[in-house]
Amino acid sequence: SYELTQPPSVSVSPGQTARITCSGDALPKKYAYWYQQKSGQAPVLVIYEDIKRPSGIPEKFSGSSSGTMTTLTISGAQVEDEADYYCYSTDTSGTHRVFGGGTKLTVL
Amino acid sequence: QVQLVESGGGVVQPGRSLRLSCAASGFTFSSYAMHWVRQAPGKGLEWVALISYDGSNKYYVDSVKGRFTISRDNSQNTLYLQMNSLRVEDTAVYYCTREAPQLMFDYWGLGTLVTVSS
């Protein structure tokens, strides 16, 4: 079955740039999406189609993609950005969806 | 405004069945593909199942194939997940989500907790 691989954790100091990667064999052909989930809450979409930002999401959140890796960048990370971040995509057939294992972002 | 409200969760013994429902409102339900996503306690998100806007196409994660059935009633604006032969590892919060045309999940319910335990 298809898998997306993320680092379990990323830690930065306040004001620094946090980068969270996600790798998968189908990513050169399929878009990636990023979700932020804070404790006890439903996930929120922060990036779609690799690089696009939904309305209402701060410009500090950006996405990029190269080959089999996609990256979520959070510029000037603050304590309020602490959350679990999940990448999401589909397999090459487009029928089966998958989330990455999630990355816990710590800002301290 | 768009609302997705899950119900039907609870505590059930291994091997038994449970049916989850998701009541949708605030949008044209019959125009959107819908998904179930689950999250085991302290674990990550796991995609479970997808149903097309008209119910003609259904897809499942391998771990639930043959045990779970996703369905919808567009006349009642309701999504379902029939879960049979439940296992301890099916214990999770189950979320109902709407898929936007760009294949993203743009709205989520608050989730319903399913606990499989003897």
Image: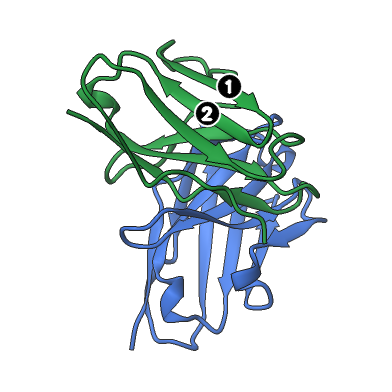
Chain colours: A green, B blue
Residue assigned mark 1: A64
Q: Is residue A11 left or right of residue B80?
A: left
Which mark identifies residue A108?
A: none
Q: Chain of mark 1?
A: A
Marks 2/1: CA distance? 5 Å
> Are dots 2 and 1 in contact, CB under 8 Å?
yes
Task: Tell me which label, 2 or 1, sits earlier in the chain.
Answer: 1
Q: Residue furthest top?
A: A59
Category of crowding for the residue at label 1, using alpha-carbon neighbours closer than 10 angstroms: few (below 14), some (14–19), many (at least 20): some
Question: How many labels sit on residues?
Answer: 2
Percent x, y for residue B56?
82, 56
10 Å neighbourhood of mark 2: few (<14), some, or many (≥20)?
A: many
Residue A101, can we see it?
A: yes
Up-down relation of residue A4 to residue B58 (above or below): above
Q: From what the image shows, is residue A61 above or below residue B115?
A: above
- Asked whether, in this view, residue B83 is left or right of residue A25, the answer is left
Disc sitting over residue A71 in the figure: 2
Whether residue B26 can be seen here: no
Residue at image position (70%, 50%) is: B74
Helix, strand or loop at label 1? It is strand
Q: Nearer the viewer, residue B38 or B78?
A: B38
Q: Position of residue A26 (x, y in %)?
A: 72, 43
Camera-side residue of A12 and A87: A12
Q: Amino acid at mark 1?
A: Ser
The quadrant where residue B97 appears: top right
